[in-house]
Amino acid sequence: MEKKLYCILPYAFLITVTFPVLSSEAKQPMSLATDQTALLSLEHRSLLLATNWTNSSSVCSWIGVTCSLRHPRVAALNLSNMALSATIPPQFGRLSFLVSLDLSNNLFYGDFPHQLSLLRRLKFISFRLNNFTGDIPPMFGQLPKLEYLSLSNNSFIGSIPKLLSNLTNLQFLELSFNSLSGEIPKEFGRLQSLQTLSVRFNRLSGAIPSAIFNISTLVVIALRNNELSGSLPTDMCRNLPTLTVLSLSKNQLSGAIPSNLSRCSGLDVLGLSYNSFSGEIPSEIGYLTSLQLLALGGNNLNGILPHEIGHIQSLVTFGAEQNEIAGSIDFNIFMNMSSLQTLALWRNKFTGNLSRDVGNITMLTLLELQENHFTGLIPTEFVQLYHLETLRLYSNSLSGSIPHELFNISTLRILSLGGNALSGVLPTHLCHASLSLEELYLGINSISGAIPNSICNCSQLTILSLPRNKFSGYIPTHLGNLRLLQRLELFRNNLTQAPSSSFITSLTNCRCLTDLVFDNNPLNGVIPASVGNLSSSLSIFTASNSKFSGSIPVEIGNLSNMMVLDLSGNELLLEPVIEENQLQKRSCHAEVVLACFCFQLLLLLLMSTVAVAGAGLGN
């Protein structure tokens, strides 16, 4: 018997037949007149249908209606994507020759009329992307010929009806993106024609029934983002010769990853991430040579990374982050993966140096190795990763200077090297080739020297984070060229500001700026009045212990969205008059808003009280 994989619909034997316009309903075949009456029960709910579904034309020429060639009856009704807001009319139960009913991507709501159970010829139902609520009615289990049922993206609650297991012809079952709870019915093992079982993003609990893994026709098992528990059967792939997708991520599954998975040799997608699997990654996983996505992150896996993974040459995405995998990484195992684009191994216990062989994984767009125990230098061979967009190596123990070649990767958008032991100085010519750079994180290192003026050429930068280093010299006065800048973090360095012009004045051109943090630098100057012209979206401004002197400009009160302002540890004075509306009536304590203002204002009041008291004593 020929197998059918469903996507959206259409049945080849359904064609549109246009009948001649009849002078009266009495001259039409009575059965077609019945269909017409049933459909007109919905017509008044939509202007589109009201103008198209009229008595002046044949039912079979109406929009969304398809009639059978063999019988002058409505065989398919496709009202998808019409913005219809209505309940399903009970009259639809009279469409007795209906084979396909597609109401997807509308605003249908309310209960399903029990009359739908009379549509015994139905093979295709799609009610996805609507506003249906309540329990899934068991009446769907009374449609013996049903092959395709999609109820996803609604607001169904309750358990999955066991009666659905009566649909022995069912090939496609999609119940994702609802609020279903309870267990997966063990009776589903009777669905021996099922090819796709997708119940993602619900609240299902309990173990996955072992009978599911005995449905030999299954191609897709997608149960991710539920609350499923228990372990996977050790022989789970014994009867799944056609399985291509196994998606079980973000559940509460535990135990070992079965080595028997290698018998699901046709797998393209294996998602087991963010569960509680333990033990080692089975070396047999290397036999899944068709895999394109392997997601094992967020578990309790240990041991080492098996070399056999290198046999999966078709791999596009590999993630084993947030585990306890140890040992060094032999990047040679990835060099034959000509399509590998994403490699995420962060927050493990990897040790050793970053091998120069990393430059052989030339199609990488994302490489995440942060939060491990890597040591040694950053290989210059990273420059060979011509497609790299994101490189995260933070929170390791890498040393030496940052290879200037990194800044020559033209596709690089995010570079995160913070929390290492890097030293040296930054290259003089930043963003000469990497004009795409959007986020640069170099904090908590020992980088010294000046911040190159060429940083102002990185016109796409949104985040520049350089705190807790040994930078010295002037803060570049042309940072305002970074018009997209949102966060600037320079605290705990040895930076100063140019005497001729303030970098703060330049930053008034950065209209997206939300965070400006440069505490603990010997800036030795005044806060310019232009501070009041900073972005109206600025919410954090901290400049404590920065050797500012002079008056606090009243213009700082223009920063109406300020949530955190810290000017403590300086030698600042309040202006004599600060208008109430400029202070925005902020609380002194709540969220540390204008903390310095409140403190100094209190101090001035106390000083005034002491002065008055002293004058009184002198009299």
Image (cartoon, rainbow, N blue to C red):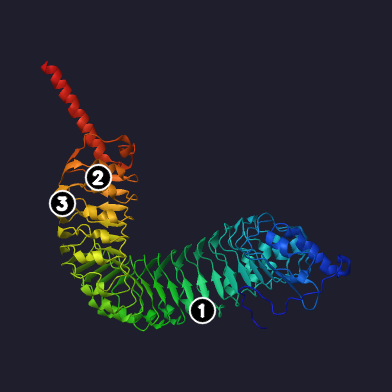
Helix or strand or loop: what does disc 3 sit on?
loop
Pointer 2 residue? 566
Can you name the residue that lies furthest to the right here? 26
- Asked if disc 1 and disc 3 are in contact, CB closer than 8 Å, the reply is no
- Vertical placement of 179 versus 268: above or below? above
* Badge number at residue 264: 1
Q: Is residue 527 left or right of residue 511?
A: left
- Asked if disc 2 and disc 3 are in contact, CB closer than 8 Å, the reply is no
- Residue 295 locus on image (x, y percent): 43, 70
Which of these two is toward me, 508 or 594? 508
* Badge number at residue 523: 3
* Badge number at residue 41: none
Confirm whether residue 235 shows in the render: no
Quarter-wise, where is residue 45 in the image? bottom right
Cα distance between the residues tagged 2 and 3? 15 Å
Whichever of labels 1 and 3 marks the residue nearer the N terminus, that label is: 1
Which of these two is toward me, 53 or 133? 53
Three-letter amino acid code at disc 2?
Answer: Asp
Quarter-wise, where is residue 122 in the image? bottom right
Q: Callout 2 environment at 10 Å: few (<14), some (14 to 19), or many (20+)?
A: some
Cα distance between the residues tagged 1 and 3? 64 Å
Whichever of labels 2 and 3 marks the residue nearer the N terminus, that label is: 3
Which of these two is toward me, 445 or 450? 450
Q: Callout 1 environment at 10 Å: few (<14), some (14 to 19), or many (20+)?
A: many
Three-letter amino acid code at disc 3?
Answer: Leu
- Residue 411 locus on image (x, y percent): 33, 73
How many numbered dots are placed on residues in this image? 3
Can you name the residue that lies furthest to the left here? 618
**Viewer-side label of 2, 1:** 2
